[in-house]
Image (cartoon, rainbow, N blue to C red):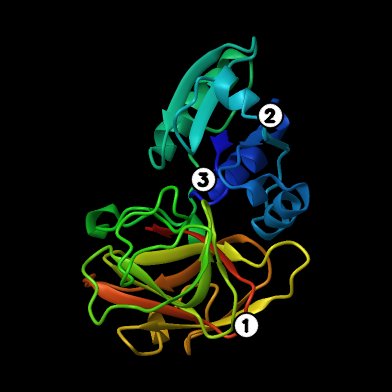
Amino acid sequence: MLRHRHEFPPEGELRAWADKYRGHELAVVGVQTPEFDFEGDLDNVARAMKEMDVRYPMAVDNDFAVWRAFDNRYWPALYFADAHGRIRHHHFGEGEYEASEMVLQTLLREAGADIDPGLVRIEPDGVEAAADWASLGSPESYVGFERAVSFASPGGAVPDGRHVYSAPADLRRNQWALSGDWRIGPVPALLNEPGGSISCQFHARDLHLVMGPPVGRPPVRFQVRVDGETPGRAHGIDVDPSGNGTTDYQRMYQLIRQSQPIGDRLFEIEFLDAGVEAFAFTFG
């Protein structure tokens, strides 16, 4: 499986397959191909594997050698090889896990395994839950100036320069803005002083922010609001109902998971400490 760490890999399905077919010569190997530098840090990867209960080997493909060897263009991507090492099937993106398991069973039977024809049944939660595609109206949005779009702070971005930003009175869907003392770099934006914030008008069930303090920096406390209020039952797994949370290392944080009906909502995150780097919003 090839993946970027801040996407939504099918870890639950892979864990279940590895457990069910452990005695039938199934080998599950993950390949971590980083988009951001911190995703290739071995300590970060090991910590994330422990938190996500990844039970199979994970190769860290920092030079994209495996990615290029497979001519891969997607994440997550599942590749199924038979007992002779030939790629017999692949699936790009989320979903179709039952069909993928049926392919897996076929290849195991070809290799002589006597397996139960039933399929695994799991209910993924947290960041492993499938995106709500029917309600998803916001694309991934980068914060660094190299790939940022729809930045709405008055005056625009000051690339690689320290600047005090403000947010406009109103944001349109998928626009975002900074407030406070930030330095917007090519990839992340760094908060220089406490009290800075990011706001975003979004349309999705889930909102995640890839963020965290650089290695060696202390944790950063934050507070989240939705339409000016505490999130309550719409809080994500990394936030309490009052909107309080802490980022202690760089990864994807789930900040909002709301119930139907899904509409345009104003998201705000205020950082109570300096030193956080923000990379990208993702939605599900």
**Residues at marks 3 and 1, CA–CA distance in whole angstroms:** 34 Å
Q: Which image quarter holds the N terminus?
A: top right
**Of the image marks 2 and 3, the number of the one nearer the N terminus:** 3
In the picture, measured across the screen, residue 26 lies left or right of residue 107, that is right
**Residues at marks 2 and 1, CA–CA distance in whole angstroms:** 44 Å
Asked which quadrant contains residue 267, the reply is bottom left
Nearer to me, 271 or 13? 271
Asked which quadrant contains residue 14, the reply is top right
Mark 2 lies on a secondary structure that is loop
**Of the image marks 3 and 1, the number of the one nearer the N terminus:** 3
Q: Amino acid at mark 1?
A: Asp
Image position, residue 167 (x, y; %): 34, 78
Mark 3 lies on a secondary structure that is loop
**Of the image marks 2 and 1, the number of the one nearer the N terminus:** 2
Q: Residue at x 45, y 48 (%)?
A: 146
**Residue 125 seen in this snapshot:** no
**Residues at marks 2 and 3, CA–CA distance in whole angstroms:** 16 Å
Total of numbered circles in the picture?
Answer: 3
Q: Nearer the viewer, mark 3 or mark 1?
A: 1
Q: Identify residue for label 2.
A: 27
Image position, residue 256 (x, y; %): 41, 72
Q: Amino acid at mark 3?
A: Pro
- Tell whether label 1 touches label 3 (CB within 8 Å): no
Image position, residue 244 (x, y; %): 54, 85
Q: Nearer the viewer, mark 2 or mark 3?
A: 3
Nearer to me, 82 or 30? 30
- Marking on residue 273: 1
In the picture, measured across the screen, residue 41 lies left or right of residue 116, that is right
Q: Identify residue for label 3.
A: 10
